[in-house]
Image (cartoon, rainbow, N blue to C red):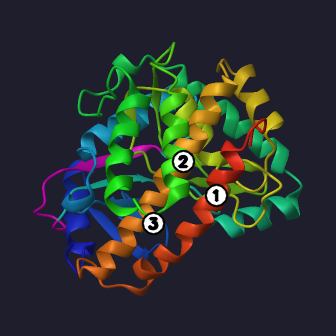
Amino acid sequence: MSAEPVGGLTDYLTGALGGPVTITDFQFLSAGARRRNIAFTATIARTPRRLVATIVPPAVELMPVDGEAGVRELARAHGVPVPAVVAVCSDTRYVGEPFVVSEHIDGETVPRRVLRTLAASGNAARTARQWGAAMARLHGIDPAAAPDSVPAAGADPAAEHLAEVEAAARALLADRPVFSLALRWLEKRLPGPPPAPALVHTDMRNGNLIVDADGLCAVLDWEGTQRFGDPMRDVAWPALRMWRFREDAREFGGFADRETFVGAYEEAGGTFDLDRFRWWKVMGTLYWGVGLAQQAAAHLDGTVRDIVMAASGRRVSEIEWDLLMQIRPRVNA
């Protein structure tokens, strides 16, 4: 990315918005692990607008930026709170990489700050209901209506995902008995194709939400969206312990219990399947453990020499504990 993208953003928005644009209050945001998010004020015809540019390096682009923008607008049209898309640019001449410009939404995204905000406001249950309803509205959209550039899950999303994760686990964690046990558990209980395939976000958890004292403001990070996925993958993922941020008693995001979240999901039209939910929760935990092992391996082989990547390997044992707690008999953890 260009070290000084102000000029490129100014030039592009001047053409895209049909008049001279002045950019001020330029600020790099902490949000976004793989992509660069930049907040700024764009003044057009003496009217200031607070905007955010999400700049996507090709190495981490999971789908073209116009596809991501299209699925975001589709979700927004169906009542999912999403920042409105202002402009999309796939031309790398402006800032060196593709980008999407969106309306800025005030609120917190850092998980611990989200938890503190909700604890202070007393609106955790309300936010949980808004979150569950937003997910149900997404799953109620005909996945065929999404842009063709949004990746499509296969005929059996669970089987395909398991095969991918199993191959990585065998390569990196073959000496860890808990992972082998969890793989056998998943293989024996493979749920089959979902009864009603859906448009799935795949990462709608605490950390990808904008929250303020009044509740849920927006859902972020749509680059991993898939068509024709299993909706229980989406419901299970935010319930994993790693997204509770030390508030383990509240299963969803560290601030919501299952009854509140699922109740709102069902009231808004979603269909909850406990067995499929449990399968995807174990699958998600195993997937995260493999991801931690991959990060550690990338440090060790020199691909990405970074202390954070190295430390990821130490967390694999936490995942083993999570897996054992989830697959133990007669416990729907």
Q: Main secondary structure of the magenta part?
A: loop
Comparing 314 with 138, the one in front is 314
Q: Residue at x 74, y 38 (%)?
A: 329
Residue shown at 87% from the left, 64% from the top: 120
Residue bearing mark 2: 181
Residue 3 appears left or right of 104: left
Residue 115 position by quadrant = bottom right
In the image, 58: left or right of 285? left
Q: Given the image, on which type of amino acid does mark 2 rest?
A: Leu
SS class, disc 3 = helix
- Circle 1: residue type: Trp
Answer yes or no: is residue 206 visible. Answer: yes
Circle 1 residues within 10 Å: few <14, some 14–19, many ≥20: some
Distance from the alpha carbon under mark 1 to that under mark 3: 15 Å
Q: Which residue is mark 3?
A: 292
Q: Quadrant of residue 315?
A: bottom right
